Amino acid sequence: MFKYVKGDLVIWMIVILLSVISVLAVYSSVESLAYRNHSGDAGYYLIKHTTIVLFGFLLIYLAHKVKYTYYSRLSQVALYICIPLLLLTLFKGVNEGNATRWLQIPGTGLTFQTSDFAKLALLIYVARMLALKQEQIKDWKTGFLPVVIPVFLVCGLIFPSNFSTAFLLFINCLFLLFLGKARITHLLLTVGMAVSCGALFLLLIFAFPHLNNRAATWKSRIENFEKGSKENNFQVNQAMMAIATGGTLGKGPGNSIQKNFLPQAFSDFIYAILVEEYGLVMGLLMVFLYLTLLYRGVRIATRNPKAFGSLLVIGLSLSLVMQALVNMCVAVHLLPVTGQPLPLVSMGGTSIWFTSIAIGIILSVSKETETELSVATT
């Protein structure tokens, strides 16, 4: 099989393992959803999710076949596309769970989460701009501002309906700016500006709740996390119960009890279901797989001779692993509920597909790096 693909084989193996785990976990955790929508037919979701995962593999394959330098040019177009899409989503998006994160594709009835596309576009664009402006990056006007303005714009458009995604993306971009040799004083000023803008926005929506229907949700999640109230932390309590009763080896595939009580057992809290059914061993394995993915990404980045390739891999790898760690921290009550899916594992179309494209790009950099190194040594 691997003779048909190029790039880091360890990453390929991690993707395969996570995909198999995903299919097993989703099939087990959708029982209540199946009873609500398809008369108990969990097979419907198994077929649907397996199809999504297989299409994800196709996207990885296609993305890794493209030379990674082409993504530098594509990111400009992608950024110009994602900004109007985010605006459209903000004002005309599909409202689900008091959040307008989805945009409906006309004539199909299908929806996709525009922030997934925006994250990928912005990270590639920032890597591109940092690579191009290595000589000017320490200058505020000609080097730093052209990179940071799109960061503020994209994160600002995501923020009103998806605070956690905007926050993680902003932190990721700041880290890339740091690696790209931006001045620490400029970074601190950027953080100060972001905090001020965020605080002003929160004050406005708490004072005028009708301006944004997410305000009450954010406030209650933070308060519930701080107080640790059992009555108001239903999802987290169920997740912690699942983890606590899983033991070392778990209850066995399909034997989860808490999946019948967790509203998002197949998405936001799928990690808890995995630990309940497969035990602490699975919980530690998941952490190991994601950290290994980050390690391999760093290894690819340090071996790549070009700034764009290195920054691109670091940005994409860190984004995936940060999201995974946040998801797992929520399940064990180390962070407030965020709504971040577990990459490549949680059920969802656009999340899996854009994650697959990101991994395909990482593999493209790995493939080209191996080629360049082999040429250099001959």
Image (tube, helix red, strand yellow):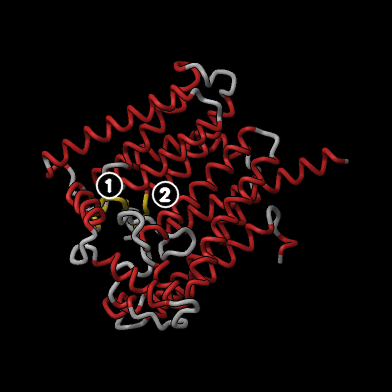
Residue 350 lies, with reference to residue 69, above or below; the image says: below
Name the residue rendered at 88%, 41% in the picture: 378
Q: Where is residue 287 in the image (x, y as percent from the top left)?
A: 52, 61
Q: Is mark 2 on a helix, strand or loop?
A: helix
Q: Which of 163 and 68 is in front in this view?
A: 163
Mark 2, Cα crowd under 10 Å, few <14 / some 14-19 / many 20+, is: some
Query: Does residue 111 appear left or right of residue 346 in this picture?
Result: left
Query: Does residue 179 appear left or right of residue 260 in this picture?
Result: right
Q: Decide which of tag 1 and tag 2 comes sooner along the chain.
A: 2
Alpha carbon of mark 1 to alpha carbon of mark 2: how far? 13 Å
Residue 84 figure quarter: top left
Q: Is mark 1 on a helix, strand or loop?
A: loop
Q: Which amino acid does label 2 sit on?
A: Asp
According to the picture, the residue beneath numbered tag 2 turns out to be: 116
According to the picture, the residue beneath numbered tag 1 turns out to be: 161
Q: Position of residue 298 (x, y in %)?
A: 62, 45
